[in-house]
Image: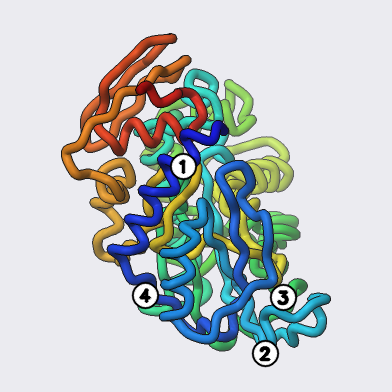
Amino acid sequence: MNEKIINFASKLFKQYYSNSFIKIDKIEQKEFGFGDFNNKISFRHFSFKNINEFNSYAISKAPAYISFSSAYYKNPSARPMKNKVWLGSDLIFDLDANDLDLSCIKIHGNSWVCKNCFDNIKNETIKLIEDFLIPDFGFSKNELKINFSGNRGYHVHVLNKAVAELDSDARKQISNYIKADNIDLEIFFPTLNKRGPLIGPKPDEFGWGGKLAKTMISLLNKNIEELINLGIEKQIAKKLIKNKAEVIFGITTGNWDKISIPKKSEFWKEILKKIAIKQSNSIDKNVTNDIHHLIRVPDTLHGETGLIAKTISLNDFDKFDPMNDAIAFDNGQKIKIHVQNSPKFYMKNIEFGPFDNEDIEIPLYAGLYLLLKNVGNLRD
Ligand SMILES: [Zn+2]
C-alpha cells in the first residue's frame, strides 16, 4: 500500500482512537499484537499495565490492527511462550463468510463481501449460539460476547471460568461435538441394527438427536432437490416427498419407519452424517483450539476496511448491519479517489460501484474502504 494512503488512513485511525475509549477486561493478563497496513500482526508479546496505558498507546501509534490473546497470562510479554505462564483462555469462535462456500463469492471474489455473505454468516452465528452454545453446552447469554470481525464475519467470545481452563485437547472435543464426529447413531436409533420398526429421535430431544430430527423435517418441507443434494436416490427422494406428511408425523413421534427404505440402517447413517457435516462445517473450522491465538480486540478498527470490530449485544444482533452500524468515519465529508476496479458494494444502504478505472468523489467511509482494500488511490 502506498505511503500516501497509509498516512491518510493513519490520521483517521488516530482520530478514532482519540475519540473512543476501548475497554478490556483483565488487560494486565493479556498479550497484545499489532499490525500495520501491510501486515495484520507485525509484532506481538506486548502488554499493558492498565487500560489508560493501552488507550494512550492506541492514540499515539494508531495501529492498523490491534489483537490480543484469547489467553490470560501471569507475564503476558515474557518470551518464550512458556515463560508467560498460562492461566486460561477464553473460548472464541471466528466465523468468516469466506468459509461458507457461497455462490456469490464466485461473483465478487473472496476479498469482498455482499449482503448475502452477511446474511449467511449471521445465520451461522445465530445457529452456533442458539443450537449449540446455549442449549447443548449450557452457557448463559451473559457469558457470550459477540463482535463484528471488522471485515467479513463475527467473533463469539465465551467468557466462562470453567471453559477458560480447558486445554487444546478439551477444546478439540468441543469442536468434535459440534461437527458430530464419531457420532454413534445407535444412541438415537436404538433399533438401528435390529429387526422391527426404526425408532429414532424426536425434534424436541436434547443435543444431536433433536437437531437431526429437526433438520430432516425442515428438509422434507423444502423440495426434492434438497434431498437429492444430500445424496438420496431420486426414487427414494420422490417416495419421501410423496409421503411427506406421514414421514414428518412419524419423526415427530419417534417413528422413523413410515416408508420402507431398503438397507435402512446404511441409508440413515449416510444421511445423518451428511446433515451433521452440513450443519457444523463452517462453525467447526473456526473454533480456536489454539490457546495462544491472537484475535482482534473488540471495538478497534480493522486495517483492511476502516470499519469498527464492533461489540454487539445479543438482543441487537438480529438487526445489526455491519455496513451501517460499524462505520467509524461518517462526518459528511467526501473524498476524491481513482478506483482501478471494484465490484458493487453497499454502505449505509447506499449502493456504490461497480467501478472500473474511474475518478470518483465518494463519502469518506466508502472511499477509505476502497483505499484500504487496495483498489484505489487518492487524487490531489
Ligand atoms: Zn457475497
Which quadrant is the N terminus positioned in? top right
Q: Nearer the viewer, residue 186 or 68?
A: 68
Residue 224 appears anywhere in the view:
yes
Q: In the rendered image, which residue does mark 4 sit on?
A: 141
| Mark 4 vs mark 1: in front | 1
User: Image check: 249 left or right of 98?
Assistant: left
| Mark 4 vs mark 2: in front | 2
Q: In the rendered image, which residue does mark 1 sit on?
A: 7
**Which disc, if any, is residue 170?**
3
The crowding category of the residue bearing disc 1, from other C-alpha atoms within 10 Å (few below 14, some 14 to 19, many at least 20), is few
Q: In the rendered image, which residue does mark 2 sit on?
A: 74
Helix, strand or loop at mark 1: helix
In the image, what residue type sits under mark 2?
A: Lys
x and y percent of residue 75 in the render?
A: 69, 86
x and y percent of residue 70 in the render?
A: 60, 72
The crowding category of the residue bearing disc 3, from other C-alpha atoms within 10 Å (few below 14, some 14 to 19, many at least 20), is few
| Mark 1 vs mark 2: in front | 1
Ligand 1 is in which quadrant of the figure? top left
x 65%, y 68%: residue = 174
What whole-number distance in Å separates the C-alpha atoms at marks 4 and 1?
A: 41 Å
User: Image check: 243 left or right of 366?
Assistant: right
Task: Specify which label sits upstream in the sequence, 4 or 1.
Answer: 1
